[in-house]
């Protein structure tokens, strides 16, 4: 951990009515309350995971917040005041074979700060000392990402792997 305050945020997306020829089915009265309860439980589980993973040197100050709004735009807006964003990806949605889900993809493309995507796989345990991987493209944003990656690799005592990506084709040519 970088010993900085941590904000755990769960965004509850608005209910969008379906456009179908079927009659409208009313939303149960306690639906929104159950969504909030589930969000608070998810945040409490995340808070415990932070406490467990920082037991040696104590957890940083942790804020928890439940926000209602469009998921990606809410998180992108939050990225304007964040040092770094971390998004999870379980790979259990409709497009489970794609590298990232819609939220992670939206953050990687539009966030105003470095983004880390934590991928959870149940098949095999992670290596005991996995390296820190940083993607670089020569932009000012990748300079900041590289700085953070060096710091994290040093703090964890692990290797740093840099992945440089480029394209010979400009976007306007595609």
Image: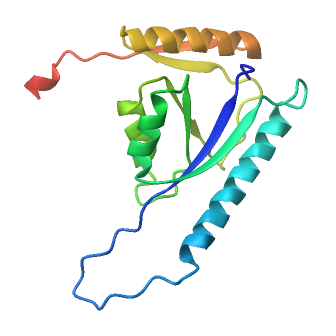
Q: Nearer the viewer, residue 96 or 77?
A: 77
Q: Looking at the picture, how far across and down is residue 96, in whole percent?
A: 46, 54
- Relative to residue 86, is residue 56 depicted above or below? above
Q: Is residue 67 left or right of residue 121?
A: left
Q: Looking at the picture, how far across and down is residue 60, in whole percent?
A: 78, 28
Q: Looking at the picture, how far across and down is residue 78, in whole percent?
A: 48, 35
- Quarter of the image holding residue 26? bottom left
Q: Is residue 43 left or right of residue 94?
A: right
Residue 98 seen anywhere in this rendered image of the structure: no
- Visual colour scheme: rainbow
Q: How many marks?
A: 0
Q: Nearer the viewer, residue 131 or 54?
A: 54
- Relative to residue 64, is residue 146 depicted above or below? above
For the view shown, which residue lies furthest in the right direction? 56
> Which residue is pictured at 36% across the width and 17% down the height?
165
Task: Give the quarter of the figure containing the C terminus.
Answer: top left
> Which residue is pictured at 42% across the width and 60% down the height?
94
- Relative to residue 65, is residue 80 depicted above or below? above
Q: Nearer the viewer, residue 89 or 126?
A: 89
Q: Looking at the picture, how far across and down is residue 85, in whole percent?
A: 54, 31
> Which residue is pictured at 40% across the width and 52% down the height?
70
- Quarter of the image holding residue 1? top right
> Which residue is pictured at 8% across the width and 24% down the height?
173
């Amino acid at each position: 951990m970088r010993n900085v305050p941590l904000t755990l945020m769960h965004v509850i997306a608005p209910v969008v009515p379906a456009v179908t020829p079927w009659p409208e089915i009313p939303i149960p009265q306690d639906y929104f309350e159950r969504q909030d309860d589930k969000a608070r439980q998810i945040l409490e589980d995340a808070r415990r995971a932070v406490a467990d993973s920082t037991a040696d040197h104590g957890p940083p100050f942790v804020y928890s917040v439940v926000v209602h709004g469009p998921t990606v735009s809410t998180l992108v807006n939050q990225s304007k005041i964040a040092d770094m964003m971390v998004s999870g990806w379980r790979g259990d949605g409709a497009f489970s074979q794609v590298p990232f889900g819609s939220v992670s993809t939206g953050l990687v493309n539009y966030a105003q700060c470095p983004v880390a995507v934590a991928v959870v796989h149940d098949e095999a345990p992670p290596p005991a000392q996995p390296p820190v991987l940083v993607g670089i493209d020569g932009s000012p944003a990748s300079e900041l990402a590289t700085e953070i990656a060096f710091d994290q690799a040093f703090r964890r005592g692990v290797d740093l792997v840099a992945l440089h990506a480029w394209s010979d084709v400009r976007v306007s040519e595609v």
